[in-house]
């Protein structure tokens, strides 16, 4: 079994357990993850230095290296982002609509998790933490595939988060990182229809995802996100928490804050996911 399929299977297996967690259990896990990042700051910076050195040897532009670089202040900002996610209201279980049928049957339309989300993104280690936190907050397992230039950083960050989750009610296997740097691993993720419920390509990853219409996916770009539910024709609903915008983590001036939730009607239910966006629109 390939690494992608094996890790997707592990993450998918945790979905029933995630669905049983209450808000306090999820929030506690996020705060423990944040504390772990602060505690392991030095080891994360050491791993990040490996990525930076490799990038310089390969002639990576300084602007790209700046987006990749981590220091104590940036890691502190990333950890604070996790705590702010924990402070957000939990959209899972929110009643969107209620009505009673003529025969007396009472019907409620609820927001529920998607299941297993695959996220493909470039060399921004902060996205590893943001994506993990947002997916776990909304009761979703997540399969991450970051850029190869940030592999050492991402591997260490996920290792730290995994260790933190083992001390909480949140299953550690709900968070998985694909370490295979070959583009074939992305192609395989895009074809895991039976395991992945949706794919989110972030930034430059969007261009090579659009060719595959079989897999539901969401396109995310800086400053906005476009939702493309290939198998749906109903309008997309938005959940906007009435809280201040989250910080940009002091990572890069163009890092997008994560602040909205996209709910997509499907199979007689609504599924919810926080998206990095200042505006969300259906296409």
Image (cartoon, rainbow, N blue to C red):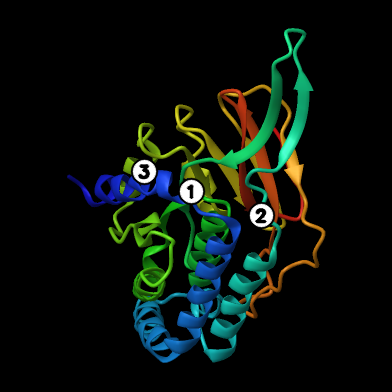
Asked whether 283 or 271 is in front, the reply is 271
Where is mark 3, residue-wise?
A: 189
Asked whether 56 or 206 is in front, the reply is 206
Few, some or many C-alpha atoms within 10 Å of disc 1 (few <14, some 14-19, many ≥20)? few
Between the C-alphas of marks 3 and 2, the distance is 28 Å
Where is mark 2, residue-wise?
A: 90
Asked whether 232 or 12 is in front, the reply is 12
Q: Nearer the viewer, mark 2 or mark 1?
A: 1
Disc 3 or 2, which lies upstream in sequence? 2
Few, some or many C-alpha atoms within 10 Å of disc 3 (few <14, some 14-19, many ≥20)? many
Figure label count: 3
Where is mark 1, residue-wise?
A: 20
Helix, strand, or loop for circle 2? loop
Few, some or many C-alpha atoms within 10 Å of disc 2 (few <14, some 14-19, many ≥20)? some
Between the C-alphas of marks 2 and 1, the distance is 14 Å
Q: Residue 2's x, y, as percent?
A: 20, 47
């Amino acid at each position: 079994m390939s690494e992608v399929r094996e890790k997707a299977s592990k993450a998918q297996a945790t979905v029933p357990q995630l669905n049983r967690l209450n808000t306090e259990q999820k929030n506690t896990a996020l705060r423990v993850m944040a504390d772990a990042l602060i505690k392991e700051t030095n080891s994360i910076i050491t791993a990040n230095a490996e990525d930076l050195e490799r990038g310089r040897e390969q002639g990576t532009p300084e602007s790209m290296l700046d987006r990749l670089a981590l220091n104590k202040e940036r890691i502190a900002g990333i950890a604070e982002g996790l705590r702010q996610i924990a402070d957000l209201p939990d959209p899972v279980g929110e009643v969107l609509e209620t009505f009673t049928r003529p025969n007396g049957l009472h019907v409620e339309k609820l927001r529920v998790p998607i299941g297993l989300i695959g996220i493909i993104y470039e060399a921004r280690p902060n996205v590893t933490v943001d994506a993990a936190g947002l997916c776990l907050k909304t009761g979703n397992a997540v399969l991450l595939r970051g850029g190869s230039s940030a592999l050492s950083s991402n591997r260490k960050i996920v290792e730290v988060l995994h260790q933190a989750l083992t001390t909480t009610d949140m299953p550690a296997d709900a968070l998985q990182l694909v370490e295979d740097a070959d583009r074939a691993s992305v192609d395989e993720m895009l074809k895991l229809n039976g395991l992945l419920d949706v794919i989110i390509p972030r930034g430059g990853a969007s261009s090579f995802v659009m060719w595959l219409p079989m897999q539901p996916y969401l396109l995310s770009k800086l400053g906005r996100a476009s939702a493309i539910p290939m198998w749906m024709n109903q309008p997309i609903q938005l959940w906007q928490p009435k809280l201040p915008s989250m910080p940009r983590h002091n990572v890069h001036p163009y890092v997008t804050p994560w602040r909205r939730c996209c709910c997509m009607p499907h199979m007689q239910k609504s599924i919810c996911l926080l998206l990095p966006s200042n505006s969300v629109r259906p296409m």
